[in-house]
Amino acid sequence: MLSTCIASCPGCCEDLQSLLPNRESQGKPQPLSSVPPQWGDAGIDPKDYTFSGLKDETVGRLPGKVAGQQFVIQDCENCSIYIFDHSATITIDDCVNCQIFLGPIKGSVFFRDCKDCKCIVACQQFRTRDCRKLEVFLCCATQPIIESSTGMKFGCFQYYYPELALQFKDAGLSIFNNTWSNIHDFTPVSGENNWGLLPENAVVQDYVPLPSSEELKAVRISTDATRSIIPITRGRRQKSSDESCLAVFFAGDYTTANARKLIDEMTGKGFQLVQTKEVLMKAEDAHRVFQQCASEFIPLLDKGPVVALEFNGDGAVEGCRSIINDVFSGTKVFVSESKASAAQDVDNFYNFADMQMGM
């Protein structure tokens, strides 16, 4: 276990610290039925929150134009659709050969009877039913579910525009809670696989091009992996090494920025980021995860959720400990002590986190 100090680093990863969600959004996901319809609100015109019956069009909503309302997309063909804002829920029905970007969704996104669509989606819950050949770059806080769907392909969400950080916060989503590759097939077929992963070298713009309309070009988009709001994780892809390392940051003024800095340093040295998690811990959880080191970290848990990172690669433990010592100072960090203990550290933390979040 390594206890080092971490520098206050306001210049690092500007606007990323704002991504910590509200405390009440931590823990188990809310059921789909808990999100109330909002179109009954005074002054809301459903037509402003609907794309229906479109063909060969590029349409969208700019930041601030949806502002947490629900949205409906239906009966569209060969369209490019961009929702550059946060929303409550989104349903996509009977769409064919469309390219779709959906900004942070506080509740669920539900694709029904869609085929040959390419999507970028950030949400609390992701579900499909009766869909065929969807390719999705996904950020999902809970386990994505497919039902009666075939030819589904998934990759890690990768996108940036200046307003996106605050939109994640407004939607109550953490950039560190992304189960994009942990798919549950509700209707598996024996001997077949209804879903898989997109190629590691998949280029986001090859699937969902940047918008071509003058109005939507005003959004300053980057699909560069190094600028993505969501850290790019390997998820359930095969690990390159039998050595992993767990690093855990505790709540403070620059937790997010420091976590992003460590990710940049480690990936810059060739190590792979496998998974990340932001979750609240209690004293009994700390004993289970940190074991003999728990007493050192328990006083830090009252400040808010922890952010955990799993790195993989030969020499990951030594590399991570070295970077912590060389780059950071100012607050305590848990880092795996050795290759031998690291695998247990990772299992202990993520088993706890999955139970905490109802996975």
Image (cartoon, rainbow, N blue to C red):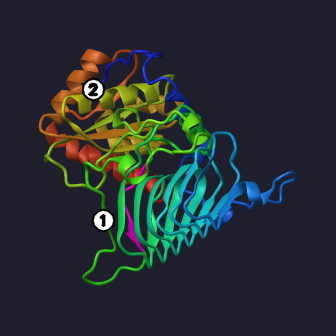
In this rendering, the count of numbered labels is 2
Amino acid at the residue labelled 2: Glu
Q: What type of secondary structure mainly makes up the magenta span?
A: loop
Q: In this picture, is 11 found above or below 289?
A: above
User: Is residue 182 in the magenta section?
Assistant: yes
User: Is residue 139 in the magenta section?
Assistant: no
Q: In this picture, is 298 found above or below 178?
A: above
Amino acid at the residue labelled 1: Gly
Is disc 1 surrounded by few (<14), some (14 to 19) or many (20+) residues within 10 Å? some
Q: In this picture, is 167 found above or below 3?
A: below
For residue 277, side relative to residue 98 (left or right): left
Query: In terms of secondary structure, where does tag 1 sit?
Result: strand
Percent of width and height locating residue 39: 78, 59
Question: What residue is rendered at 46% in x and 74% in y?
Answer: 131
Question: What residue is rendered at 43% in x and 51% in y?
Answer: 208
* Quadrant of res 118: bottom left
* Quadrant of res 92: bottom right
Q: Which label number is shown at residue 274?
A: none
Decide which of 142, 165 is in the foreground and name it. Answer: 165
Q: Which label number is shown at residue 265?
A: 2
The answer to whether residue 110 is visible is yes
Decide which of 289, 327 is in the foreground and name it. Answer: 327
Between tags 1 and 2, which lies in front? 1
Percent of width and height locating residue 264: 31, 29
Percent of width and height locating residue 155: 35, 54
- In magenta, the rendered stretch is 178-185
Is disc 2 surrounded by few (<14), some (14 to 19) or many (20+) residues within 10 Å? some
Q: Which label number is shown at residue 196?
A: 1
Query: In terms of secondary structure, where does tag 2 sit?
Result: helix
